[in-house]
C-alpha cells in the first residue's frame, strides 16, 4: 500500500492506495492558522484506522504545493543573501519584477567581479561579516557563466559551508541552465523557501516515525517524479508545480485512461492538461511564478481563473509565458460576479458519490448572472479543450477536482466522452502515489576529444546510475528524454545535453 498526501492552500487531502491501484480510504483536513504540519498529522491519524499494520505501507508520497501559498503570503520564509559572480559590474539590478512581500526577504546582495579566475578571497571576509550582520538564513550564489563552468559557484559554496555550516547555500547551476536572470530568480526563490520546506518535512518525518512507519518519505516535483526528503529540502523550488503534475496523472489513472485531456476544477481555478501514453508534456516557455520570470520546467497546462482571485490558487501564481491583454480582460469579466466559488460550495458536502453531488449542484440556487457567467466560463473551458485535442483522434475528457460535478454537466455532449471517475476529489493525492524516481543530467559539453554521440551516451549512463542511487529499481530504469541545445554563437563546438532517466520505486 501507499499513502498519498496533497497539501493544498486550504486543506490537506490524503488517500491510501492499494497495491492493485484502488483507493481504499481517504480523508481531508482543513489547514487552520497556517498550521500545515498539524493538518498533515491529522490527515495521517484519520487514515491509520484503515491499516492493520503500518508495515503494510511501502511509501508516503507528499505533494507540497502549499509552499506556493507560503511564498505569496511571505510567511515562514528564510532571510536570504544573494551573491552574484560577474566578470564586470552588471547594470541589471537583481529581483526585478519581484513582489515586495518576497523581495523584503532578500536582506543582503553582493556583486563579485571576477577575471579569468575567481578572486573570491579578496571579498570573503567582508562578505562573511555582512552576511552574519544581516542574520541570513539561506544564501543563493549565482555565476553568470556557471552553466558552462560552475567552479566559481562551487568554490564560494565550499567557503560558505565551512564558515557558516548551518546555512543552506543554493548554486544556480543546480536549479537551471541557460538564461541568467531566470536562473537567478529560481535560485533565490529556492533559498527563500528552504526554511519552510525543512521545517515542514522534518515535522512530518518525525511524526511518521512516532506512528511506527518505517517506509521512505517521498516528495513530488514539478515533473511528477519523486524526490527524497533530502532533495526536497535542498531544492524546494522544484516542488512548486507538482500540484498540476499530480492532478493530471491522478485523474488519468482514476479514469483508467492512458491518453486523455484532464480538466481540474477547484478553488476558483481550472487547469487543463493533456496526458499521452501516461505522460504529460512539459512547458518549454518561460514560467512566471507570482509574476517572477524563471526557467523552471512545469507541466504544460491552460489555466483559467474562475471568480474572484483567491490567495493560494496555484494557477493564478504560476503561468507559462506572459498573459495577453485579452486574457486579462476575460478574467476581469468573469471575476465581476460574486459567490460562485466551486470549492466553497463543495466544502461541507456530505454527498458520497457523483450522482448525489450532481443532484446537490443542480439544486443550488444561482442568480441569472451566476448562470450566465458559468455559461461563458464553460465555453472558455471547451475552447481550451479543443486547443489540446490532437488532430488524428478525439481524446476522452476526464473532469476532476471539487467542482467536477458542476462542470461535467456543461462539458458533456453527444460527440465525445466525458467522465468524472470515482475519487476525483482526491486526484492530487492519488497522483502523488504514482510518481517515479527520476534523475537528470543537464550539462554543457565542449566537443574537443569526444563526439556528440559519445557525450550523449556518457550523460545517459550518469542519469541511469543516479536514478538507481536515488532508489529506482534497476530493471525498470529507462531514458525518458534526450534534448540537445547547440551554442552556435560560441567558438568551437559547444553543446548542452539534457538527459532524464526514470524508474519505478524499489519495493513498490
Image (cartoon, helix red, strand yellow):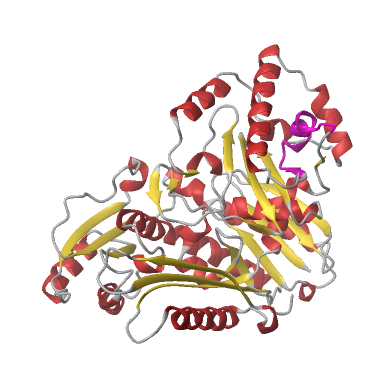
Residue positioned most to the top = 368
Screen quadrant of the N terminus: bottom right
**Snapshot quadrant of residue 353:** top right
Residue 426 drawn in magenta: no
Residue 409 drawn in magenta: yes
Q: Is residue 273 left or right of residue 50?
A: left
| Res. 170 visible in picture | no
**How many numbered discs, if any?**
0
Image height of 478 relative to 141, above or below:
below
| Residue at the (79%, 62%) spot, across then down | 17
Residue positioned most to the right = 355
**Which residues are the magenta region?**
397-414
Image height of 242 relative to 495, above or below:
above
The answer to which of 3 and 226 lies nearer the viewer is 226
Residue 55: % across, % down: 77, 76
Screen quadrant of the C terminus: bottom right
| Res. 151 visible in picture | yes
Residue positioned most to the bottom = 449
Residue 137: % across, % down: 34, 62
Residue 101: % across, % down: 36, 42
| Residue at the (44%, 28%) spot, across then down | 325
| Residue at the (44%, 71%) spot, across then down | 497
Residue 260: % across, % down: 73, 49
| Residue at the (23%, 62%) spot, across then down | 84
Q: Is residue 138 left or right of residue 163?
A: right
**Snapshot quadrant of residue 351:** top right
Amino acid at each position: 500500500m501507499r499513502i498519498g498526501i496533497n497539501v493544498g492552500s486550504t486543506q490537506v487531502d490524503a488517500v491510501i492506495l492499494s497495491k492493485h491501484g484502488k483507493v481504499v480510504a481517504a480523508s481531508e483536513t482543513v489547514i487552520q492558522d497556517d498550521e500545515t504540519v498539524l493538518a498533515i498529522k491529522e490527515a495521517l491519524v484519520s487514515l491509520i484506522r484503515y491499516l492493520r499494520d503500518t508495515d503494510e505501507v511501502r511509501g508516503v508520497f507528499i505533494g507540497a504545493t502549499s509552499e506556493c501559498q507560503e511564498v505569496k503570503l511571505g510567511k515562514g520564509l528564510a532571510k536570504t543573501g544573494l551573491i552574484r559572480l560577474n566578470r564586470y559590474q552588471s547594470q541589471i539590478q537583481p529581483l526585478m519584477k519581484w513582489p515586495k512581500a518576497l523581495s523584503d526577504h532578500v536582506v543582503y546582495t553582493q556583486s563579485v567581479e571576477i577575471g579569468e579566475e575567481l578572486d573570491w578571497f579578496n571579498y570573503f571576509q567582508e562578505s562573511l561579516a555582512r552576511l552574519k550582520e544581516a542574520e541570513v538564513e539561506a544564501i543563493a550564489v549565482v555565476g553568470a557563466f556557471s552553466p558552462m563552468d560552475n567552479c566559481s559557484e562551487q568554490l564560494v559554496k565550499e567557503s560558505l559551508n565551512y564558515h557558516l555550516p548551518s546555512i543552506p547555500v543554493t548554486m544556480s547551476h543546480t536549479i537551471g541552465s541557460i538564461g541568467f536572470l531566470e536562473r537567478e530568480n529560481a535560485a533565490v526563490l529556492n533559498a527563500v523557501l528552504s526554511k519552510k520546506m525543512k521545517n515542514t518535512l522534518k515535522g512530518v518525518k518525525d511524526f511518521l516515525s512516532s506512528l511506527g512507519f518505517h517506509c521512505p518519505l517521498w516528495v513530488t516535483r514539478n515533473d511528477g517524479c519523486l524526490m527524497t526528503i533530502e532533495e526536497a529540502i535542498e531544492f524546494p523550488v522544484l516542488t512548486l508545480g507538482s500540484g498540476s503534475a499530480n492532478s493530471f496523472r491522478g485523474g488519468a489513472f482514476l479514469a483508467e485512461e492512458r491518453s486523455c485531456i484532464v480538466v481540474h476544477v477547484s478553488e476558483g481555478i481550472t487547469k487543463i492538461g493533456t496526458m499521452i501514453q501516461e505522460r504529460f508534456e512539459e512547458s518549454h516557455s518561460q514560467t512566471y511564478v507570482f509574476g517572477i520570470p524563471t526557467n523552471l520546467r512545469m507541466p504544460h497546462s491552460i489555466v483559467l481563473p474562475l471568480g474572484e482571485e483567491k490567495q493560494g490558487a496555484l494557477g493564478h501564481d504560476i503561468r507559462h509565458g506572459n498573459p495577453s491583454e485579452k486574457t486579462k480582460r476575460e478574467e476581469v469579466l468573469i471575476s465581476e460576479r460574486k459567490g460562485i466559488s466551486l470549492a466553497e460550495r463543495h466544502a461541507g458536502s456530505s454527498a458520497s458519490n457523483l450522482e448525489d453531488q450532481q443532484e446537490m449542484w443542480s439544486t443550488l440556487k444561482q442568480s441569472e448572472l451566476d448562470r450566465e457567467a458559468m455559461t461563458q466560463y464553460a465555453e472558455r473551458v471547451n475552447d481550451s479543450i479543443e486547443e489540446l485535442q490532437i488532430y488524428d483522434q478525439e481524446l476522452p475528457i476526464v473532469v476532476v477536482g471539487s467542482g467536477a460535478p458542476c462542470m461535467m454537466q456543461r462539458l458533456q455532449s453527444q460527440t465525445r466522452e466525458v467522465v468524472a471517475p470515482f475519487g476525483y476529489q482526491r486526484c492530487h493525492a492519488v497522483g502523488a502515489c504514482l510518481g517515479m524516481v527520476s534523475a537528470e543530467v543537464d550539462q554543457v559539453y565542449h566537443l574537443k576529444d569526444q563526439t556528440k554521440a559519445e557525450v550523449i551516451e556518457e550523460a545517459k549512463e550518469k542519469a541511469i546510475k543516479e536514478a538507481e542511487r536515488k532508489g529506482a529499481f534497476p530493471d525498470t530504469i529507462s531514458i525518458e528524454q534526450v534534448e540537445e541545445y547547440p551554442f552556435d554563437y560560441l567558438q568551437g563546438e559547444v553543446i548542452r545535453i539534457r538527459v532524464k532517466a526514470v524508474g519505478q520505486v524499489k519495493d513498490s
